[in-house]
Each structure stands twice: as C-alpha cells, then as structure tokens.
Amino acid sequence: MPHLEIQPENKNAEPAPAMRERVIAWAQRFWRPAGTAVAVLLALPVTWHVIYGKHGLSVWQHEHTEDRALQKEIQDLDQENAQMRQQIDRLKSDPDAIEHEAREKLHYAKPGEVIYTLPDTPPK
C-alpha cells in the first residue's frame, strides 16, 4: 500500500479568498478615482465642443441675434411696402396727390407761380 504523506499546513500562506478580497479592495480604492478622472477628461472636450464648436452655444447665440435683426428688418420693409402701396393707390385715384407729387418731386408750378429752392443743408 502506498504511503500517503501529509504535509503540515503552511501558516504563512494566505487563503485564496483573502487575496481576492485585497485585490478587489485595491481596485476599488484606485480604479474608481482613475475612472472619475478619465470621465472628467473626456467631458472637458465635449463641453468645449458644445459651447464653442461648429454648432455650439456661441454660434447659436450669434445666429439668434442675427435672426432677430433680420426679423426687424423684414418688419420694417413690410411697413415701408405698405406705405408705398398706399401712396400708389392715392396716386392712381387722387388728382390732388398727383399734383402734390408733381410739385414736390418735379418742381412743377402753376402758371404765374414762382418756385424757390433752398439748399438742404445750410453752408458753413
């Protein structure tokens, strides 16, 4: 019969679960802050792109301001067009308006009238 030899236990060796727990504790202690740092470093360029990128907030704000200025210009032009349409309608139908325009723009005068034209700005 073969002889089985029983070796004494090594009291210096740690059991496998204790080593595993130490590795897990080390990973939790060092990898969580490292993962947080990596996430922050990745978030910084994304934040920069959101603010200053091709379609970022600064570009949006500039385009929004430009849009408001263009809307105001459109509103002013619509108002000017409405005034011109009213003037055209008056010139088509009102003889007094036609006479007023002829006197004002073309410097026409009735027989016996004298027209004096003054300079727009006084000389200095």
Image: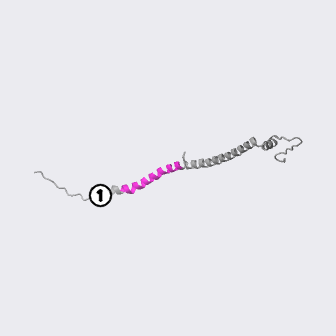
Considering only vertical position in the picture, is 42 above or below 12?
Answer: above
Q: Please give the range of residues in magenta.
A: 26-50
**Secondary structure found at label 1:** helix
Query: 105 or 122, which lies in front?
Result: 105
Considering the whole magenta stretch, tell me its main secondary structure.
helix
Q: Residue at x 44, y 54 (%)?
A: 36
Residue 102 in the image: state x and y as whole percent: 80, 41
Considering only vertical position in the picture, is 76 above or below 25?
Answer: above
Query: 74 or 62, which lies in front?
Result: 74
Is 107 on the left-hand or right-hand side of 30?
right
Q: Residue at x 51, y 51 (%)?
A: 47
Disc 1 residue type (three-letter): Ala
Residue 69 in the image: state x and y as whole percent: 64, 48
Residue 101 in the image: state x and y as whole percent: 79, 42
Residue 22 in the image: state x and y as whole percent: 33, 57
Q: Residue furthest left?
A: 1
Query: 53 or 88, which lies in front?
Result: 88
